[in-house]
Amino acid sequence: MAHVQITMLAGRTIEQKRRAAKRVTEVLREELNVKPEKLTIAFVEVPRDSYARNGVLLSDRTDLQ
């Protein structure tokens, strides 16, 4: 059994997550011989005010807007 957790900023569409799940599954099947039925994937969406880089919340950064 394998589990992949993808942590990312909130805002991706359900269609983007569908495509990502499909491709991640394909890569793990091809490269690591993981059976798709034994793979789980979790998308963890984090708001900009809960993510920081270099000591600054992303919601406070103007260069990323």
Image: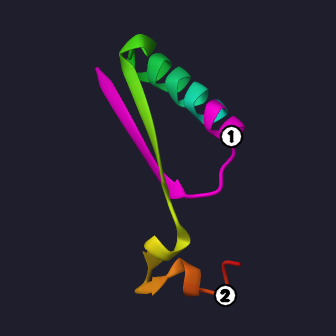
| Helix, strand or loop under label 2 | loop
Q: Position of residue 55 (x, y in %)?
A: 40, 86
Relative vertical location of residue 33 with respect to residue 17 in this rendering, above or below: above
Rendered location of residue 9, percent (x, y) = 55, 60
Left or right for 64, reference 10: right
Q: Which mark is residue 63?
A: none
Q: 6 or 26: which is nearer to us? A: 6
Q: Where in the figure is residue 26, as x and y percent of width and height?
A: 55, 21
Residue 3 is inside the magenta segment? yes
Label 2 sits on residue: 62
| Residue located 51% across and 24% down the image | 25
Per the model, the C-alpha gap separating discs 2 and 1 is 25 Å
Residue 56 vs residue 11: left or right?
Answer: left
**Which residue is farthest left?**
1
Callout 1 environment at 10 Å: few (<14), some (14 to 19), or many (20+)? Answer: few
Q: Where's the C terminus, which quadrant? A: bottom right
Residue 51 appears in the rendering: no
Q: Which of marks 2 and 1 is nearer the N terminus?
A: 1
* Residue type marked 1: Gln
Q: Is residue 62 left or right of residue 43?
A: right
Q: What stretch is highlighted in magenta?
A: 1-18
Please state the horizontal and vertical placement of residue 41, each as a whole percent of the image: 44, 32
Identify which residue is drawn at 66% across, 31% down: 19
Residue at coordinates 32% horizontally, 25% vertically from top-left? 2
Task: Please report the residue visible at 36 percent of the width from the left and 15 percent of the height from the top.
Answer: 38
Residue marked by disc 1: 16
Q: Is residue 6 left or right of residue 2?
A: right
Q: Is residue 50 above or below residue 17?
A: below
Q: Is residue 30 above or below residue 14?
A: above
